[in-house]
Amino acid sequence: MTAIRVLLVDDQPMIRTGFRLILEAEPDITVVGEAGDGQAGVEGTRTLQPDVVLMDIRMPHMDGVDATRHIAESGSASRVIILTTFDLDEHVHDALRAGASGFLVKDGPADSLVAAIRTVAEGDAVISPRVTRRLLDRFSRLADQTPPAVPRSLDALTARELDVLRALTRGLSNAEIAQDLHVSEATVKTHVAHILEKYALRDRVQAVILAYDTGLVRPAAGQ
């Protein structure tokens, strides 16, 4: 079994040490390096090529949002999980737009950290349906305040793929989407993969952002 390579990026050495102890107790995870700020994290990602980067959102020199953007725009295969103190940190929205595959709260349980790393390493997003719904509430309010990006046509998607994309914006898991659309979970996974492939998206988080940017879904009244 090839171990999942992880880079820790946080300006607090004790936080990094704690994460290292948790992760190195897992047989399928290896911590390949540490960095104390965003710039060092970007450089470490380029040289070490980790599978997953655990990125603190608030750091000196370069914060986690900018560091994530640099990593995503470089074309790196490394996937970023944002670490934050609060589960609705105002910068999380910016980090997801910048290319993060999700986020974790620092004081969450150790098993959630390990599960998240495995999930992201396999190519999926790490935001749970419960947290996705809360994030989308915030995203919707922000969408009310700022104009969407230049719309991209969704003509490349089939009617069923559009149904799946709408379901993703509701924070549904693959199993929940399958039940809602009366199809198999494997079929849902295939549709999600086609959506990501057609629009060169990193994961389902980016697909949700696409749905809002193109106007496929709009903020609910009163949000």
Image: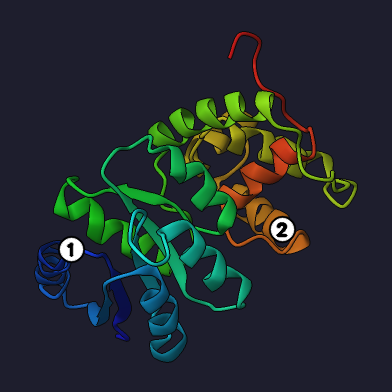
Above or below, 58 relative to 37: above
37 relative to 154 in the view: left or right: left
Above or below, 9 relative to 207: below
Task: In the displayed orientation, state which residue is furthest to the top.
Answer: 222
Tell me where residue 175 appears, x and y as whole percent: 48, 40
Instruction: Indicate which disc, 2 or 1, sits on the residue closer to the N terminus.
Output: 1
Q: Which residue is mark 2?
A: 194
Query: Of helix, strand and loop, which one carries label 1?
Result: loop
Tag shown at residue 134: none
Tell me where residue 137 appears, x and y as whole percent: 52, 25
Tell me where residue 39 appears, x and y as whole percent: 41, 74
- Measure how far apart labels 2 and 1 are at the Cα level: 40 Å
Please name the residue shown 61% across and 8% down the image: 222
How packed is label 2: few (under 14 Cα within 10 Å), some, or many (20 or more)? some
Above or below, 21 relative to 131: below
Give the residue type that dot 1 points to: Gln
How packed is label 1: few (under 14 Cα within 10 Å), some, or many (20 or more)? few
Please name the residue shown 39% across and 59% down the image: 81
Give the residue type that dot 2 points to: His
Please name the residue shown 28% across and 57% down the image: 115
Foreground disc of the pair 2, 1: 1
Position of the N terminus by quadrant: bottom left
Position of the C terminus by quadrant: top right
Res 118 quadrant in image: bottom left
Above or below, 124 relative to 33: above
Q: Which residue is mark 1?
A: 12
Please name the residue shown 39% across and 67% down the image: 61
Of residues 60 and 66, the one nearer the viewer is: 60
Tell me where residue 198 appears, x and y as whole percent: 78, 60
216 relative to 52 in the view: left or right: right
